[in-house]
Amino acid sequence: MDEASAKPTQAFHIETAGRASRAAAFAAGFILLILVLLPVFAGRNLIQDLIFLFYMLALAQCWNLLAGYAGLISVGQQAFVGLGGYLLFALTLLGGLNPLLAIPIAGLVSALFALPTALIVFRLRGAYFAIGTWVVAEVYRLVIAQVKPLGGGTGTSLTPSVTSSVPGIEWVKSLLDVRTPAARDIVSYWVALALAAGTLALVYLILRSRRGLALGAIRDHEAAAAGLGVDIYRIKLAVYVATAAMTGMIGALIYLQKARISPDAAFSVLDWTAYVIFIVVIGGIGTMEGPVIGAIVFYLMQRYLADFGASYLILLGALGILVMLFAPKGLWGLVSERYDLTLFPTRRRLVVSARDHERRA
């Protein structure tokens, strides 16, 4: 064999996961198992706090997929939170449906409402799109406030017969020896955990799919993506409808746990959009890890600083400004760049591997 043929040749393959991501997957599975078993030994206050953390994390992942990847900066996602909540009340109070069955139906109907909504707001661009989504959310709020069977402008509450009919309550009561309110919180906790984990898994699968490649191209350079044949309108529409469905289910869960709803609370831009944007921005927009970090930071700040009143909001604003000035990629961006760390790998890397012809011969 001559010298030329003995030289190693280069072969290429696509790689996504690395050692860190595989270790993170194992750690995530272990943490998920601990969280599933947590109600066995945790107090009711911690369970309620974690329910809040889970649905804020799920909402943040939805908004991050919408804005961080599809480039749709919406400030009107409260439309689907409120819609999902009111659909739960309508399906249970007026339709007599089981509350847990009403949650996925609320998500499906929210997706159906998202289609005509998209036909309106997709005609707008940039800041006009953001304001347009807010206006549409206000229209939803005003329309719902006119529905007298659901309490009109003052809202309504779930009846005890509905809240106590959630499947699993009697089983939890007998297993953990707790009262009905605590058992209902535990069932809501497990549903919230399933929704948060399911949202993370769904977003990850989307980003790892062919549509995820298209979303990455749109995020990096929309004009170039269009030039390569990416159907931008269809991709954005699919993401908008998918996030509306997930947000609707989360909204249904939120108000199942609260058992009380009103138009002003359900369609609150502060609670369901402004806080979610804050979570994504401080954590790191356009990454899956960022909303997780942001949700934990937001939860800790609300848990320990909310009693300070207006000062709490000032601290939130100050933290957001500092992060945007000195860490525009968010807190996760600082960690990722410093340690070259990715826990949810979605980018595809072309890896070069050298092979010797003599060894293959």
Image: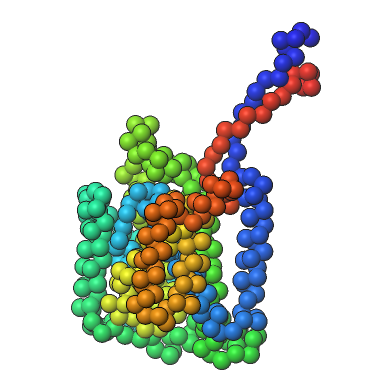
Image quarter hosting the C terminus: top right
Q: Residue 77: x and y, percent? A: 33, 63
Image quarter hosting the N terminus: top right
Residue at screen point 48% across, 85% down = 165
Q: Say how many tags the image has.
A: 0
Residue at screen point 63% across, 29% down = 352
Q: Nearer the viewer, residue 326 or 34?
A: 326
Q: Residue 33: x and y, percent? A: 65, 68
Side of 175 where 307 appears, left or right: left
In the rendered image, is residue 175 in sight?
yes
Q: Residue 295: x and y, percent? A: 48, 65
Instruction: Name the image quarter holding residue 153.
Output: bottom left
Side of 101 where 145 appears, left or right: left
Q: Is residue 152 above or below residue 204?
A: below
Q: Nearer the viewer, residue 159 or 254?
A: 254
Side of 192 where 157 appears, left or right: left
Find the residue positioned furthest to the top: 2
Q: Nearer the viewer, residue 348 or 149?
A: 348
Q: Residue 353: x and y, percent? A: 67, 29
Residue at screen point 62% across, 60% down = 28
Q: Is residue 51 above or below residue 331?
A: below
Q: Nearer the viewer, residue 128 or 190?
A: 128
Residue at screen point 65% across, 23% down = 10
